[in-house]
C-alpha cells in the first residue's frame, strides 16, 4: 500500500473557531488520506456542537490523556490557547502521534527545547501552522528569490496592520504573558514574519521596539523592527492591532525586480505583483508571472 492510500487517523484538540472553520474543512478536503476520529474540548457543549458539525463517528473527550490512551491517533491537530501548546504537543508526541499545532508553538525557548526533546525521544514530528507558505504564489516567489531569478534581494518591508477592539481582548486568555505569551507580535504578525523568513532565509541582526498604546493588556499592541538578513538584505517590519485600515503586506526589492504581496488573511496568485527593473527584457519578466494553478494559502494547502 502506498503512503497516499493509507488514511491517517486524526484527532483535534480544541474545537473552537480555528478548528471548526479551518482545520475541519482541511480534513474534509483530504478525506482520502485523513480520517477525523476524535475531538477533545473541556467545554462539553462546544464539543458536542463540533461533533455534530463534523458528522460521522467522531469520538468526544474532555481529557487529552484519555483521548490519547483510547484512540492512539497518527496525527494530532492542536487549536487551543497558546499556553497549552507545549504540554499538549509533548503529550501527543509521547503517545506516538505527529503534531500540527497552531501558532505560536510555545511561549519560550525552554518550552521549545522540551518539544524538541520529545520529538527526538519519540521519533515523531511537530510542525506549526504557517499556511501562508503553502499558497502557489508564495511557492513561486520563493523559487524565484532563492534561485536568483530576480537578482539579489536588497530591501524588504513586512506589514501586518490589523484592528482588534476591546471585546476581542475580553476573552480571558488574550493579552496576558502567561496565557498568550505576547501580543500581536506572537499572535498576529507572526504569519507575515514567517513568510518573510521563508522568502529571504535566516536573519543575523534585529533591532526592535514595542509599545502598548491603546489596549488594556499586559503585552504590546504595536511593534516595529529593523532586520538584517544573512544574504545582506535589510527589512522593516511593522505589526499593529490598532489600524482601522487592515492590510497584510510583504514587498521585496531585488536587483532585477520588486515582488509585492498585498492581502489580509490569505492570498491567491492575483495578490502577487512583479515589477521588473528598467533594464530587464520583457520576455524575461513575462516568465515571472504566477503559475497557472492557483492554490490559495490555507490550512488545506498546508495539511496536504
Image (cartoon, rainbow, N blue to C red):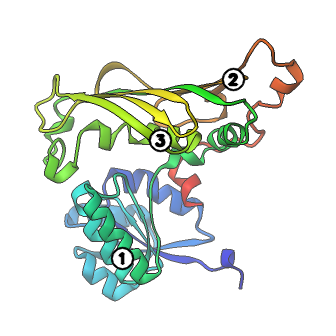
Q: In this figure, what is the number of numbered marks?
A: 3
| SS at badge 1 | helix
Left or right of 51, for residue 304: right
Q: Position of residue 175 (x, y in %)?
A: 17, 41
Residue position for label 1:
118
Q: Quadrant of residue 220?
A: top left
- 261, 297: nearer the viewer: 261
Label 3 Cα neighbours within 10 Å, binned few <14 / some 14-19 / many ≥20 = some
Residue at the spot x=51%, y=42% of the render? Answer: 197
Q: Measure the C-alpha gap from mark 2 to mark 3.
A: 19 Å
Q: Quadrant of residue 189?
A: top left
Q: Quadrant of the N terminus?
A: bottom right
| SS at badge 2 | loop
| SS at badge 3 | strand
Left or right of 294, for residue 16: left
> Going from the N terminus, do you reach mark 1 or mark 3 first?
1
Against 92, is 179 above or below? above
Q: Quadrant of residue 115?
A: bottom left
Residue at the spot x=22%, y=63% of the render? Answer: 45
Q: Position of residue 66 (x, y in %)?
A: 26, 83
Against 242, is 48 above or below? below
> Going from the N terminus, do you reach mark 1 or mark 2 first?
1
Residue position for label 2:
255
Instruction: Specify the label residue 203 is tagged with.
Output: 3
> Going from the N terminus, do you reach mark 2 or mark 3 first?
3
Assess whether mark 3 and mark 2 are in contact (beta carbons under 8 angstroms): no
Left or right of 75, for residue 81: left
Label 1 Cα neighbours within 10 Å, binned few <14 / some 14-19 / many ≥20 = many
Disc nearest the viewer among 1 and 2? 2
Disc nearest the viewer among 1 and 3? 3
Q: Position of residue 125 (x, y in %)?
A: 47, 71
- Residue furthest to the right: 283
Amino acid at each position: 500500500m502506498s503512503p497516499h492510500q493509507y488514511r491517517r487517523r486524526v484527532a483535534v484538540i480544541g474545537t473552537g473557531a480555528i478548528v471548526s472553520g479551518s482545520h475541519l474543512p482541511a480534513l474534509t478536503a483530504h478525506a482520502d488520506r485523513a480520517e477525523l476520529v476524535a475531538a477533545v474540548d473541556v467545554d462539553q457543549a462546544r464539543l458536542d456542537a463540533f461533533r455534530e458539525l463534523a458528522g460521522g463517528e467522531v469520538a468526544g473527550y474532555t481529557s487529552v490523556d484519555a483521548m490519547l490512551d483510547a484512540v492512539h491517533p497518527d496525527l494530532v491537530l492542536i487549536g487551543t490557547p497558546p499556553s497549552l501548546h507545549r504540554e499538549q504537543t509533548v503529550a501527543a508526541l509521547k503517545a506516538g502521534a505527529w503534531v500540527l499545532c497552531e501558532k505560536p508553538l510555545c511561549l519560550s525557548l525552554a518550552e521549545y527545547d522540551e518539544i524538541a526533546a520529545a520529538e527526538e525521544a519519540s521519533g515523531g514530528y511537530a510542525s506549526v501552522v504557517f499556511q501562508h507558505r503553502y499558497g502557489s504564489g508564495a511557492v513561486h516567489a520563493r523559487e524565484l528569490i532563492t534561485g536568483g531569478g530576480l537578482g539579489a534581494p536588497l530591501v524588504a518591508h513586512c506589514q501586518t496592520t490589523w484592528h482588534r477592539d476591546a471585546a476581542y481582548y475580553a476573552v480571558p486568555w488574550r493579552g496576558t504573558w502567561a496565557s498568550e505569551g505576547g501580543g500581536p507580535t506572537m499572535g498576529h504578525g507572526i504569519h507575515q514574519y514567517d513568510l518573510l523568513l521563508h522568502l529571504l532565509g535566516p536573519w543575523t541582526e534585529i533591532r526592535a521596539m514595542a509599545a502598548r498604546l491603546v489596549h488594556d493588556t499586559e503585552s504590546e499592541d504595536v511593534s516595529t523592527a529593523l532586520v538584517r538578513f544573512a544574504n545582506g538584505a535589510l527589512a522593516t517590519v511593522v505589526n499593529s492591532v490598532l489600524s482601522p485600515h487592515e492590510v497584510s503586506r510583504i514587498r521585496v526589492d531585488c536587483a532585477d525586480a520588486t515582488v509585492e504581496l498585498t492581502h489580509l488573511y490569505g492570498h491567491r496568485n492575483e495578490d502577487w505583483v512583479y515589477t521588473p527593473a528598467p533594464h530587464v527584457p520583457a520576455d524575461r519578466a513575462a516568465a515571472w508571472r504566477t503559475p497557472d494553478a492557483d492554490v490559495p494559502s490555507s490550512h488545506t494547502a498546508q495539511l496536504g
